[in-house]
Amino acid sequence: MNPIKQHKKWLSEIAEYLLITIAIGAYAVGVNRILVPHAIVGGGLTGICEIIYFASGMTIPIWLSSLVINTGLLVLAVLTVGWRFCVRTIYGVICMAVWLWLVPIPKVPDMTDPFMAVVVGGLFVGVGLAVIYLNGGSTGGTDIIAMVVNKYKHLPIGRVLFLCDLVIIGVAYFLPEVHSLEKVLFGLTYTFMATTAIDVVMNKTRQSVQFFIFSQKHYREIADAIMTQADRGVTILDGEGGYSHQPMKVITTLAHRHDVNKIFRIVRDIDPDAFVSQSQTSGVFGLGFDSIKGV
């Protein structure tokens, strides 16, 4: 590989691991500083660790049970799913345990209103997980369970995760610290907030714009201007008018949202009569957009 490309690849890897580390820190703050003081138990492995924490009289720390359970799940994943899935997951598991150990659980909640704790804690956890996933990371936990179940039973991963969360929150109801319908509803609301934050951040980050530009006489000038001025690649397609049966050149390009006005100005200045179709798209991977993440 070209030394410059190799250097860029290593810098990209370092940046991704740095973002994963910071995001896991935000996750740990949401759990230890905001949710646990109010005895709000959500889904996932962290919810299981909270149950162990409260059931043991707060003697078994969350970071320890997280590390132990994740280690067992990682062994299961290596034997069933394969080693490739576990590379960044191992880093995420260790980093999660370290952050949960470093972030103290306050004796008095930082936020007195439990509902606001649900909202803010859900945002911390959801945004943190979104950044982790966008950078190809994982925190293990029920993700591993879902992957294993999906391999043998072919059940949708989202459904498996949802069922796991329901079971965990249901079990938490029997804890003295949680034993109320209100706390169960708080746990469900927190899980909803976290998953919604994940979807919003990931969709907004990956959202791009696709253009189809129809210009009879100036397609080459428009294509060249988009490549030089907007720094976007283009593809010129051969088309035919459905009514006139006249040949037509169609320019298609993918761009980031902040490039939209620039591309419209280019088309307007070169061919005001051009026909332009713009549509939102997500999950664009390749040169100039998101890199295809390995697991």
Image: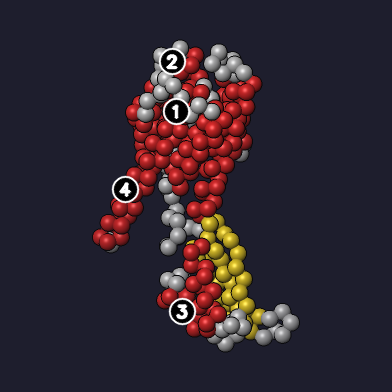
Q: Give the crowd class for mark 1: few <14, some 14-19, many >=20 residues within 10 Å.
A: some
Q: Is residue 180 left or right of residue 89?
A: right
Type of the residue with mark 2: Met
Q: Where's residue 256, x and y in %?
A: 49, 63
Q: Earlier in the sequence, mark 3 or mark 1?
A: 1
Q: Secondary structure at mark 2?
A: loop
Residue at mark 1 to residue at mark 2: CA–CA distance:
18 Å
Residue that mark 1 sits on: 110
- Number of marks: 4
Q: Earlier in the sequence, mark 1 or mark 4?
A: 4
Residue that mark 3 sits on: 225
Q: Is residue 289 visible?
A: yes
Type of the residue with mark 3: Ala
Q: Give the crowd class for mark 4: few <14, some 14-19, many >=20 residues within 10 Å.
A: few
Residue that mark 4 sits on: 14
Residue appearing at x 50%, y 78% in the figure: 266
Q: Where's residue 33, x and y in %?
A: 43, 28
Residue appearing at x 43%, y 63% in the figure: 288
Q: Earlier in the sequence, mark 2 or mark 3?
A: 2
Q: Is residue 42 visible?
A: no
Residue at mark 4 to residue at mark 3: CA–CA distance:
35 Å
